[in-house]
Amino acid sequence: RMKTNLLTYIILLYTGVLSGQKDHLFGEIQKIIKNEEDVDLSSASGTMIAVLDWDSTYTYSIGTLSKESNIPVSDTTIFQVGGLSHAQLTMLAYQMFELGLISQSDSLKKFKIAPFKDSWINDLTIGQLMSHTSGLPKILPELTPFKSDPDDSYINIPADTIDKYLAIWSKVNTANKLSTHSQYNYYLLGKILWMVTDTRVHKEGSFIPEMKNTFYKDVEDYKNSEIPTLYTAQGRKVGFEHLNGFMPAMGLLTDLHDLIILSQVYLRLSGKDDFKKFALEINANDKKNIKESFSSGGFRWVKTKKSGNLYFMTGVMKGCSAFLGFVPQTQTCVIILSNSGQSIHSLGMHILRMINYQFTRTY
């Protein structure tokens, strides 16, 4: 009887400590939102935040599904994460690498994509696509006429149109070594990864069974899900974008619950040498961080004074924004999802810096 009471007391005490830590941390996050000039959540009605600190996870709901609703956003509210889709693709590529299905040195030649048969694009490797070192352009001007709807820019751009104009571009242009980022890197990466149909890796775009709300789909294909209203950075209502040909690259729909699972996998693998080389290695020429550069897995990075490298990815759509950042050395991570096109990258970086200074924000 005494042992039972003692165990109950210890559990209650531990729960109280966790609750106190969670409340204290939220107070510090609210200070950042209130006081930092580069943080603005006013155009969003709902924002979800997760903080991972070793084996503890704290989640926070700020606001509602729409400005007219009183239903709070939650960890199962669906968001469109754009460029943050690349974190899923990098993990998918690593899974295939572990199974011996692909190598970072494999070129597009291996996958026999007809439009690139006579193009130097055919010689690009998976590693170059992942690390944004391919020299592909930031934009293809030839695709601009297809972007007739400013609120749904990609709806009229199918994959064969993208392939056609990439091939045409490559006939008159060599690789641009000054190009540090291109959505066409992950367009091509997504194209070749989905060609691998081994169900040990993924089934219809889902590869971690516990991530039940994560798919490369249009929002209309979701049933019985919490779908928020979306707003531009200026606060105007917009719909979810239709990615069409870009769907395999940046069309991920997901929720906070699933991104926490993905982040836990990243943190766990960040101590493995083969994963560090595959996804977190910094090019020797970029280690001074003089210009924007990317890790081998496509993460932007910042060298911190005390905690080693901080890795992050962002996604900004017309009516959604997303952030995922983590610090392997301290096993900390921050995830933010918001239903506005206003970037929440600054908020994510402020929180990451704050939690790596023992949860205290000073002004």
Image (cartoon, rainbow, N blue to C red):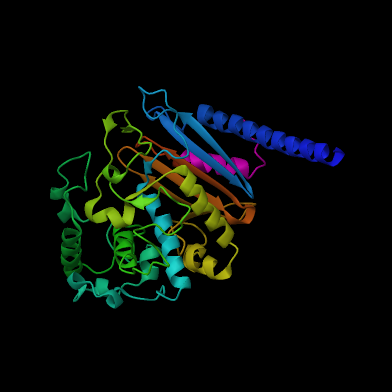
Answer whether residue 134 is magenta in the image: no
> Eyeballing the image, is 152 above or below 115?
above
Instruction: Pinpoint residue 38: horizontal percent, then vertical percent.
Output: 46, 34
Residues 3 and 71: in front is 3
Q: Which residues are magenta?
A: 346-363
Going by the image, does 267 lie left or right of 297? Answer: right
Q: How many marks?
A: 0
Residue 358 picture quarter = top right
The quadrant of the rendering that contains the N terminus is top right
Please say whether residue 362 is visible from this viewpoint. Answer: no
Q: At 48% across and 72% down in the image, what residue appears?
A: 98
> Eyeballing the image, is 224 above or below 200?
above
Q: At 55% across and 40% down in the image, what residue appears?
A: 351
- What is the residue that sits farthest to the front in this orientation? 1
Instruction: Pinpoint residue 123: horizontal percent, then vertical percent.
Output: 29, 75
The quadrant of the rendering that contains the C terminus is top right
> Eyeballing the image, is 51 above or below 161?
above
Q: At 36% across and 76% down in the image, what residue appears?
A: 106
Q: At 35% across and 22% down in the image, what residue appears?
A: 68
Instruction: Pinpoint residue 312: horizontal percent, then vertical percent.
Output: 48, 51
Residue 2 picture quarter = top right
Residue 354 picture quarter = top right
Going by the image, does 26 lie left or right of 43? Answer: right
Answer whether residue 349 is magenta in the image: yes
Instruction: Pinpoint residue 307: horizontal percent, then vertical percent.
Output: 63, 53
Please say whether residue 274 is visible from this viewpoint. Answer: yes
